[in-house]
Amino acid sequence: MERRDLLFLESAIQAIDEALQAVGNEVERDRLDETSLSRLATVEAELRRSRLALEKIVRETS
């Protein structure tokens, strides 16, 4: 894998981290109903799974 590809993967990981932070901020504001919190929990889980998958790819190609 080319260095450029690794940079794209690392950038995607950083974007996921930022999205996870945004999700956490929304939860901390405590303005959401239970349905919205449930949806955010699902989004958070999917983001974490995606991050783990990208990290695995980076490790395997480094």
Image: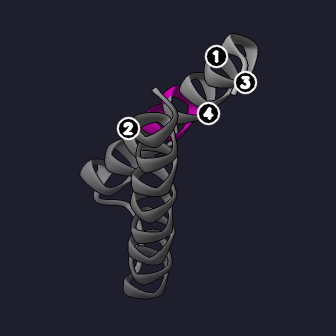
Circles 2 and 1, Cβ within 8 Å, touching? The answer is no
Say which residue appears at 62% left-offset and 22% top-offset: 6
Q: CA distance from mark 4 to mark 2?
A: 14 Å
Residue at the top extreme, as displayed: 3
Q: Residues within 10 Å of mark 2 (few under 14, many from 20)?
A: few
**What kind of residue is marked 4?**
Ala
Residue 16 falls left or right of residue 49: right
Q: Which residue is mark 1?
A: 7
Q: Position of residue 25 (x, y in %)?
A: 35, 42
- Looking at the image, is mark 4 or mark 1 earlier in the sequence? 1
Q: Name the amino acid type tagged 3.
A: Asp
Question: Residue at the location (45% across, 42% down)?
Answer: 60
Residue 21: mark in rendering: 2
State the mark number for residue 5: 3
- Residue 51 rendering spot, x and y as whole percentages: 45, 49
Q: Which mark is residue 12?
A: 4
Q: Secondary structure at mark 4?
A: helix
Q: CA distance from mark 2 to mark 3?
A: 25 Å
Q: Residue at x 72, y 18 (%)?
A: 2
Mark 1 and mark 3 in contact? Answer it, CB < 8 Å: yes
Nearest to the eye among marks 4 and 1: give it: 1
Residue 45 percent across, percent down from the top left: 40, 69
**Which residues are the magenta region?**
14-18
